[in-house]
């Protein structure tokens, strides 16, 4: 029996998220079905992040266990049978106790906004044809790493024991026709990135004052935050691990 990590990418538009559900098409289900056929045994994968409906991943990481050594051309075979919107980039052996979710040191997300109507960005970003104040957005982003409790940006019906997240990076990247929010942390709450983006956009448009953004964080009340941005613009971009996941 051996354990393996697999790096995957997917366009989330037609999936009800990563995690397997009854009566819904999910990324986990599609990959497990493909692995089961190719390895001729029932397969289960565990993901580093359970991305929501419509959310994309440039790099998500899953782990799985296999009784026998993997076929030499498994990577090629998987990409041949998987649909066009899911790709496997790497498969490599790890220690028996390495865990795609719990061994992760950090995760990085990006949220893409574009200002000019663009048919090539439909499904891949949030079309937002409104003026924004750069200084206000930058001020809000710089405030985020100061805090650790992000209860205000967690959606209801979440099963977590703590709302503490250690933010390593939060910043806006301005380009000529688009805007990207970058955030990296050890963990994220359900709906957290979209909540942070939507509430900052309210400040950037002048709907709320910057100090109100601070108040929303400190209030620990999710009813004060906005979550009104679509999943199309959200990408899981990277998952980082330590060297201790690899066999000695």
Image (cartoon, helix red, strand yellow):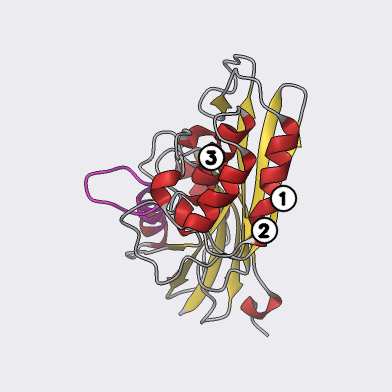
For mark 3, what is the residue?
Answer: 199
Does 154 lie within the magenta span? Answer: no
Q: Does residue 170 appear anywhere in the picture?
A: no
User: Looking at the image, which residue is at 39% across and 41% down?
Assistant: 53
What range of the chain is rendered magenta?
19-35
Q: How many residues crowd mark 2 within 10 Å: few (<14), some (14–19), many (20+)?
A: some
For mark 1, what is the residue?
Answer: 142
204 or 129, which lies in front?
204
Image spot of residue 155 (x, y percent): 39, 51
Q: Secondary structure at mark 1?
A: helix
Q: Is residue 225 left or right of residue 111?
A: left
Q: Secondary structure at mark 3?
A: helix
User: Looking at the image, which residue is at 62% across and 66% down?
Assistant: 166
Vertical placement of residue 198 versus 95, above or below: above
Image spot of residue 122 (x, y percent): 53, 22
Q: Is residue 121 left or right of residue 47?
A: right
Instruction: Tell me whether circle 2 and circle 1 mark residues in contact (CB < 8 Å).
Output: yes
Q: How many residues crowd mark 1 within 10 Å: few (<14), some (14–19), many (20+)?
A: some
For mark 2, what is the residue?
Answer: 145
Q: Does residue 230 appear anywhere in the picture?
A: yes
């Amino acid at each position: 029996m051996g354990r393996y990590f697999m790096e995957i990418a997917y366009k989330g538009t037609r999936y009800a998220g990563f995690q397997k559900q009854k009566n819904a098409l999910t990324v986990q289900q599609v990959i497990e079905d493909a692995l089961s056929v190719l390895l001729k045994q029932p397969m289960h994968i565990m993901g580093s992040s359970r991305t929501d409906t419509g959310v994309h991943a440039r790099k998500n990481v899953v782990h799985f266990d296999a009784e026998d050594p993997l076929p030499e051309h498994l990577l090629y075979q998987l990409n041949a049978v998987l649909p066009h919107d899911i790709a496997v980039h790497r498969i490599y052996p790890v220690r028996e106790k390495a865990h795609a979710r719990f061994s992760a040191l950090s995760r990085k997300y990006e949220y893409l906004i574009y200002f000019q109507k663009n048919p090539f960005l439909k499904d891949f970003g949030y079309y937002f044809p409104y003026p924004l104040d750069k200084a206000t957005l930058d001020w809000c982003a710089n405030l985020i790493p100061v805090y650790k409790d992000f209860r205000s940006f967690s959606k209801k019906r979440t099963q977590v024991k703590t709302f503490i997240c250690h933010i390593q990076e939060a910043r806006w990247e301005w380009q000529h026709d688009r805007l990207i929010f970058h955030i990296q942390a050890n963990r994220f709450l359900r709906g957290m990135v979209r909540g942070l983006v939507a509430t900052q956009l309210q400040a950037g448009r002048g709907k709320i004052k910057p100090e109100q953004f601070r108040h929303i964080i400190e209030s620990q009340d999710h009813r004060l935050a906005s979550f009104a941005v679509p999943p199309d613009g959200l990408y899981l971009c990277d998952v980082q691990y330590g060297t201790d996941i690899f066999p000695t």
